[in-house]
Image (spheres, rainbow, N blue to C red):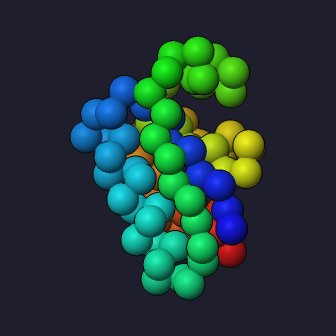
């Protein structure tokens, strides 16, 4: 199971990012655990300066915007 963290303030873009990842994972049959992190200290630990950001299995994959569907599919495959 992949551990996915969506880093952000809880804004609409952050929520849509989490929903996108969950939807694509379900379509691909990939088990994921998606959590939302809103603590600024957590952002700094990953070097994130703009949100939303996506961390998969403790590796920063994306930050600053909602990721493209193709990016998420590649991360989960």
| Residue 63, placed above or below residue 70 | above
The quadrant of the picture occupied by the C terminus is bottom right
Residue under the image location 47 percent in, 62 percent down: 21
| Residue 26, placed above or below residue 22 | below
Residue under the image location 63 percent in, 44 percent down: 55
Q: Does residue 64 appear in this view?
A: no
Q: Quadrant of residue 31?
A: bottom right
Residue under the image location 40 percent in, 51 percent down: 17
| Residue 19, placed above or below residue 29 | above
Horizontally, residue 44 falls left or right of residue 28, namely right
Percent x, y for residue 62? 59, 43
Horizontally, residue 44 falls left or right of residue 65, namely right
Q: Foreground: 74 or 21?
A: 21
Percent x, y for residue 56? 67, 51
The quadrant of the picture occupied by the N terminus is bottom right
Percent x, y for residue 69? 46, 65
Q: Does residue 33 appear in this view?
A: yes
Percent x, y for residue 38? 44, 27
């Amino acid at each position: 199971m992949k551990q996915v963290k969506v880093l952000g303030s809880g804004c609409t873009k952050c929520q849509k990012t989490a929903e996108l990842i969950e939807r694509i994972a379900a379509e691909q049959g990939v088990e994921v655990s998606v959590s939302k992190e809103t603590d600024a200290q957590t952002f700094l630990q990953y070097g994130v300066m703009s949100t939303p950001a996506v961390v998969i299995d403790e590796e920063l994959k994306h930050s600053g915007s909602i990721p493209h569907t193709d990016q998420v599919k590649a991360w989960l495959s």
